[in-house]
Amino acid sequence: MFNIGSIVEAFCVCLLDDGLECICDDKKIIVPLEQLSWIHGENVFNQFHPQQTIPLLITEYNYQNGYFYGSYRATLPTNPYIELSRFPPNTFFRGIVIQERRDDTVFGDEPVIKLSNGAIGYLDAHSRFTKTNPPISVGLELDVALSFLSISPIDTRLGLCGPWTDSFKEDNRSDTKEILDIGHNVTATLVQKENFGLFYEYRSHRILVEIIRVTWDYKHSGAIMNQFEIGEEHTVRILGYDYTRNIYGGSLFHANRENPYWELTEDKSETIYQGTIYMMPVAHPDSSYSIQLPNGAYGDLGRRNVPESLAKGDKIDVMIKTLQLLTYQYSPLILDTPTQKPAKNRLPPVVKAL
């Protein structure tokens, strides 16, 4: 089925400045530049030409413009981040500083490091502030170890630390045969409940499922989490590994497709939903409304075009702007208000038994 999460064979139509335009079954697919290769800075345009057939993982649907987004690199048999996950802990890799300050974090002084296998990571801010670490500059080569690694089909998070950091603990992953594959599901046993999440055990491994990833109904995660009993077995998606705390990160939400977010992928029209304001934005200008759709899914709606007179519990007409189910973001659904007056007969979403 041609849908988010499926792999299709698509024809290259043309090369864009920032990616590829492809087509499959008369459906337009845009492949962003960063989704062509796992290797940072690799010139990959010479690998593609018009009318070439390539495999693509469908990652997202642009509801406003009516086309899909796809990833070529997610279909490749080799992935440098997967390769890293199979090394035992406390393994050091040679890297080079390619940027002194990363742009997308509150820690503006986290350097960007490119490892010898092409993977890109960030030197954790806490590991820089020591007396023995070297001054950071572009072109500096240094040995680094992994502090955190999270992998999804289309993006990654790789934290690094230097050999001057003594934050590692004894690790039960020293036997590489026992290392769990990030991105796969396991059947794990619930062994501990905390107010911030659930701890599971699988073989000799500990897995933490944070409260926000316990259920698709994350607004009621606490109440749902309290219904679980110690000793129960649940299917858990392995999201990543924290090398400094010796624990895997997991998700119950991502291991289960029977949720209202996946149902929304079946509707690719410009459907207008009548949502309910579940939570008002805070004072910060970048904060947003939390809107609950009729099928139970929650989405974020920016302040733009939202009347200030609206309050919690009020109804508002919304449309889907982006729906990102293959990443590990806390809010996979972004909403927008209709650009024109809604039709008299609003279309409800397809609702299945939950």
Image (tube, rainbow, N blue to C red):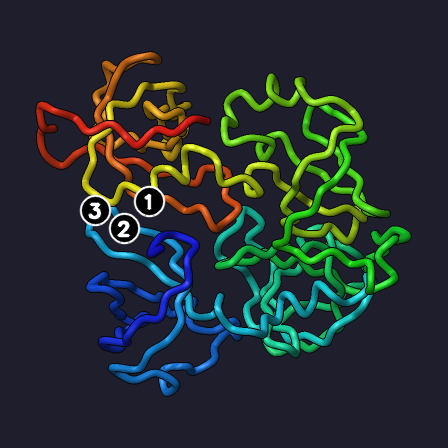
Label ID, residue 322: 1
Which residue is located at x 25 percent, y 17 percent? Answer: 315
Query: Image check: 341 left or right of 300?
Result: left
Which residue sits at x=87%, y=62%?
A: 175
Q: Which numbered disc, 3 or 1, marks the residue that appears first in the sequence? A: 3
Above-or-below relation of 232 to 332: above
Q: Residue at x 62, y 30 (%)?
A: 211
Q: Are marks 3 and 2 in contact (CB under 8 Å)?
A: yes
Q: Is residue 71 left or right of residue 302?
A: right
Q: CA distance from mark 3 to mark 2?
A: 6 Å
User: Alpha-carbon neighbours of circle 2 within 10 Å: few (<14), some, or many (≥20)?
Assistant: some
Q: Nearer the viewer, residue 324 or 40?
A: 324
Q: 332 or 28: which is nearer to us? A: 28
Residue 164 visible from this viewpoint: no
- Residue 304 left/right relative to 260: left
Which residue is at the front of the view, 163 or 184?
A: 184
Between 22 and 302, the residue placed more toward the observer is 22
Q: Quadrant of the N terminus?
A: bottom left
Q: Position of residue 185 (x, y in %)?
A: 64, 48
Contact between marks 1 and 2 (CB within 8 A): the answer is yes
Residue 56: image location, x then y, percent: 39, 67
From this viewpoint, which residue is outermost toward the right? 170
User: What's the residue type where badge 2 is placed?
Assistant: Asn
Q: Which residue is mark 3?
A: 64
Give the amino acid type for the residue marked by disc 1 in the picture. Thr
Does label 1 or label 2 sit earlier along the sequence?
A: 2
SS at circle 3: loop
Q: Measure how far apart labels 1 and 2 are at the Cα level.
A: 6 Å
Query: Could you tell me which secondary element the residue under label 1 belongs to?
Result: strand
Q: In the rendering, at what x and y percent does residue 120 appear? A: 58, 67
Residue 82 image offset from top left, x and y in percent? 64, 66
Q: Which residue is mark 2?
A: 62
